[in-house]
Amino acid sequence: MFGCSHHRERQKTDDLDELDDVEMVDESVAAMALTNLSCSPASPLLATSFPDRDLLMGSHSYRDNCGHLSSSVASSGFYSGVSEGNDRSPPMNTHLSESAPERLLNFEASPTDDCLDLEEDVKHYYYDDDSTPLRKKQRSQVHTEIRYQCTWPKCKTIYNTVNDIERHVRTAHLGRDSDSELSDDEEEFYFTEVEVNIDNVTEKFSYMTTSSPPSNLQLIDPKSLGVFDHDYQRKEHRHNSSSQASSVPSPGFHMNPGMSSTPIPIKVIEGNVKRSLSWQNSQNSSPNALSISSPIRSNRLSPQARLQQHQAQSPKSHLFSSSPKSNAMHRKPRSEVRKCRKIYGMENRDQWCTQCKWKKACSRFQD
DNA sequence: CGTGCCGGGTG
DNA sequence: CACCCGGCACG
Ligand SMILES: [Zn+2]
């Protein structure tokens, strides 16, 4: 509150460059302190520590995609007061980690979160063919795997590992022949991660129906070519012209000299199976269309912002068995883009965009 | 354990 | 408003 207004000499260090000593000290001290206290049994641990079996307790996100929320949950008989706990959730409910046959059925009865029909299918299939669903159930969980898909205009190949995809991009598109991993991260801009869920069940009993793998497309689409760099470009521009333009290594967007026709260096997201955000979309069906739906002022709301805000909507395909309210507290996708901080590093903090300096959403590298 | 950013402070 | 930072999600 008052007093201790030390560490201030930061920012605006235009006059100098190397006298970071003071700040340095500060930081290191702080860091130390942190390390010392590091093991605070506070709370967040719980969240992260769940093993893998039960996704544990409920606590939805604030709003349900379906429109109704807690009420339905409550009615299912399990918790009654939950929904308001947007954050953590009642520690009770150690259910189902131990398994209990009929439990399952109960769960199914409550629609709760998403209004997906997919679920239905699955579950039908489930006890339809299985007389002892439970057992199976237990070991089968939503098992999402990550694949890497090339986002180069025409090519949409999918690989299993980063290495593969990177090599692919490097050789096939960037025109390099370096066989090993010796390059900047440029490749990163030409592929995207897709998350596919594979439940053991499907794997095991592959008879299902078309077990069509995630080889989906419709990635790149239109807009990418039309409107992309938008303000990154212009920001950078003015950055360059206005300031020293000295040695800022630049984010690494330049292309290989060999290629004249630069494709789109952006990371397109959502292979369609990607993350799970799909909150009520009432308007985002059009590519780059006018998205004038901001209830408040705020001319342009970054995707991030909303992600962060509504970040929670449950994915469509989570395991039926793992409790209806297995939820997942605010899930935040976290853009895959490297921001000022990462790029320039702590030591060049003065090169960060202002927002980054203030620990706000980066304005230079929007995602 | 680092990174990104919200929320909430202060001048 | 600019500026900073605690704290927390996420990977
Ligand atoms: Zn930034």
Image (cartoon, coloured by chain):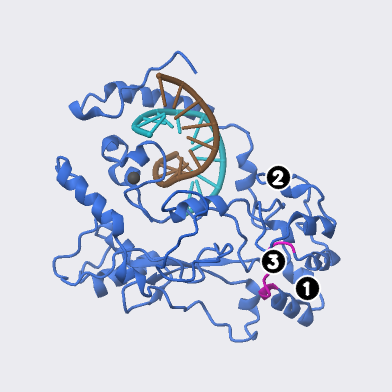
Chain colours: A blue, B brown, C cyan
Q: Tell me if mark 1 has few (under 14), some (14-19) or many (20+) residues whose alpha carbon lies within 10 angstroms of its own.
A: some
Residue A11 sits above or below residue A120 on the image = above
Residue A310: x, y in percent?
Answer: 57, 54
Nearer to the camera, A132 or A305: A305
Q: Is mark 2 within 8 Å of ligand 1?
A: no
Residue type, mark 2 in image: Gly
Q: Please name the residue shown 52% across and 79% down the image.
A: A213
Q: Which mark is residue A85?
A: 2
> From mark 3 to mark 1, how far is it between C-alphas?
11 Å
Identify the subunit bearing mark 1: A
Q: Which mark is residue A139?
A: 3
- SS class of the residue under badge 2? loop
Residue type, mark 3 in image: Arg
Residue A247: x, y in percent?
Answer: 16, 44
Identify the subunit bearing mark 2: A
- SS class of the residue under badge 1? helix
Q: Is residue A293 magenta?
A: no
A165 to the left or right of A275: left
User: Answer yes or no: do the residues labelled 3 and 1 have beta carbons within 8 Å?
Assistant: no
Residue A353 position by quadrant: top left
Q: Please name the residue shown 79% across and 59% down the image.
A: A72
Going from N to C along the chain, the mark reached first, 2 or 1, is: 2
Residue pointed to by mark 1: A133
Residue A154 position by quadrant: bottom left
Q: Tell me if mark 3 has few (under 14), some (14-19) or many (20+) residues whose alpha carbon lies within 10 angstroms of its own.
A: few
A173 to the left or right of A80: left
> From mark 2 to mark 3, how far is it between C-alphas?
29 Å
Can see residue A38? no
The magenta segment? A112-119
